[in-house]
Image (cartoon, rainbow, N blue to C red):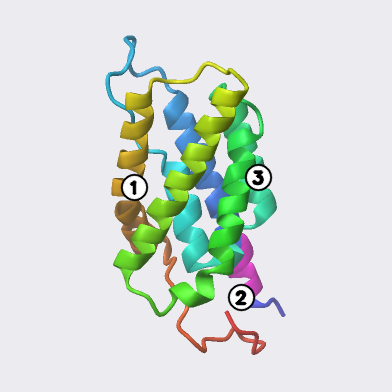
Amino acid sequence: MVDQGATRTWTMRAVFVALCLLIMFFHLLPLETTPRRWASPDLMVCLCFAWALRRPDYVPTLAVAGVMLLADLLFQRPPGLWAALMVMAVHWMKSRERRQRETTFLLEWFTVAGCLIAITMVYRLVLLVLIVPSGTPFLVLMQLAMTILFYPVVVILSHMAFGVRRSAPGEVDRLGHSL
């Protein structure tokens, strides 16, 4: 007999990786031939944070590390830097998941915004110290703001399309383990 909880967990892990690969695919499509004047939100970051706060078991650390490292390589960022910062941020978010259950969405949004601002500042600081050329500060700030603004949209879409929601306090799986 197959445990439905384990099947659902592994299916959602595969969906998480597939969604990240789909986001990378559309990001790499050559839709514009001129340089952009605006920066789009980092939807993979929103997806990682939203799923890590709602269902930490759907976002394993190795999947986040692999997907973000692949994104670093494909988007020609310094390999591993953003991936390492995202792994640390997602791990921190997972550790706060139980405390976030009883909070409002607004407080969750502020937590995500603060974490995103912190890892973006560390990322930019490391690039500055290592004298690595990076984007203009205006575009970085625009992407940061757009990512923060799009977080609720990703949360709503994750809930409506994939059923990723917060587990209720005291909710247990079929074997009696707390979620």
Q: Residue at x 53, y 32 (%)?
A: 125
Q: Residues within 10 Å of mark 2 (few under 14, many from 20)?
A: few
Q: How far is disc 3 from disc 2 in space, using C-alphas? A: 24 Å
Q: Nearer the viewer, residue 34 or 30?
A: 34
Q: Residue at x 34, y 47 (%)?
A: 148
Q: How far is disc 1 from disc 2 in space, using C-alphas? A: 32 Å
Q: Nearer the viewer, residue 170 or 163?
A: 170
Marks 3 & 2, CB-CB < 8 Å contact: no
Q: Nearer the viewer, mark 3 or mark 2?
A: 3
| Above/below status of 101 relative to 141 | below
Marks 3 & 1, CB-CB < 8 Å contact: no
Q: Position of residue 12 (x, y in %)?
A: 55, 60
Q: Who comes first in sequence, dot 3 or dot 2?
A: 2
Identified by mark 3, the residue type is: Ala
| Above/below status of 170 relative to 58 | below
Identified by mark 2, the residue type is: Gly
Q: Quadrant of the C terminus?
A: bottom right
Q: Which residue is mark 2?
A: 5
Q: Which residue is mark 1?
A: 148
Identified by mark 1, the residue type is: Ile
Disc number placed over residue 65 in the picture, else none = 3
Q: Position of residue 178 (x, y in %)?
A: 60, 84
Q: How far is disc 3 from disc 1 in space, using C-alphas? A: 21 Å
> Of helix, strand and loop, which one carries label 3?
helix
The magenta region covers 5-10
Q: Quadrant of the N terminus?
A: bottom right
Disc number placed over residue 8 in the picture, else none = none
> Of helix, strand and loop, which one carries label 2?
helix
Q: Is residue 147 magenta?
A: no
